[in-house]
Amino acid sequence: MIIHIHGMAPSMSDPFYEWREAYAGLIGCELRVVAWMPITADTPDVVTNLGAAAFVFSGAVMIAPAEGSDVFLTWAWKPRVYGYHLAVSQQVDWQAGCLDRIRCRFDGPWEGVQGARLIDVRLFQAPSMEGGLKTAAIRHTVAGENGDVFFWIGCGDAGGVGDHDDLWVGVNVEPANLADLVEVLVLTDQAKT
């Protein structure tokens, strides 16, 4: 695995340490499952949008490798520091049973994601309300039988990713505000060809 951190040498004190640790076991691995975990009120909309290339919902996303630990992505809130931002965890911090679990589809625009090998992860920050930057989204690239596919998971709404308490997910489509985002971390699988 090659790790690039723009402007900073990797260390325990770097602000992206938790991201590097969370994805260390995923880079180069086959993705067994990518699942949407909406709050119950959003489940009907997620089911309706399963065939869409991009959609928004409240909840979390689970990325599970064929071997190793699952990673959960969701939004978090830190007042007077970040506002809403994308957060990573090895477990979902909500009470068990309060989120539904829906696998991304095996057909349509998402069909190339599950079963493919994760070869590239790019972490992006977005301007906050206070003018600073905060973690907003991750762009994942996977290599499968039919070539490379990329998918985004980020805090967002229909207008893109940023300071929101919902998640924007998209496959082979960029967020509307891509020009406003700053790439801050790249994790790459050395074995990709």
Image (tube, rainbow, N blue to C red):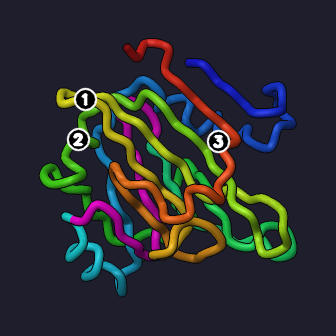
Residue 61 inside the magenta-drawn segment: yes
Furthest residue in direction left, as rendered: 107
The relative height of residue 15 versus residue 11 in the rendered view (above or below) is below
Q: In which quarter of the image is residue 77?
A: bottom right
Distance (Cα) linking label 1 and label 2:
8 Å
The magenta stretch is 52-69
Residue at left 25%, top 29%? 147
Q: Are marks 1 and 2 in contact (CB under 8 Å)?
A: yes
As shown in the figure, which amino acid type bears the numbered disc 1?
Answer: Gly
Residue identifier under label 3: 19
In the structure shown, which secondary structural element does the residue marked by tag 1 occupy?
strand
Q: Which circle marks residue 147 in the picture?
A: 1
Residue at left 68%, top 49%? 182
Q: How crowded is mark 3: few (under 14 residues within 10 Å), some or many (20 or more)?
A: some
Q: In which quarter of the image is residue 80?
A: bottom right
Q: Which circle marks residue 112 in the picture?
A: 2
Residue at left 19%, top 64%? 51
In the structure shown, which secondary structural element does the residue marked by tag 2 occupy?
loop
The relative height of residue 191 versus residue 161 in the rendered view (above or below) is above
Furthest residue in direction bottom, as rendered: 41
As shown in the figure, which amino acid type bears the numbered disc 3?
Answer: Trp
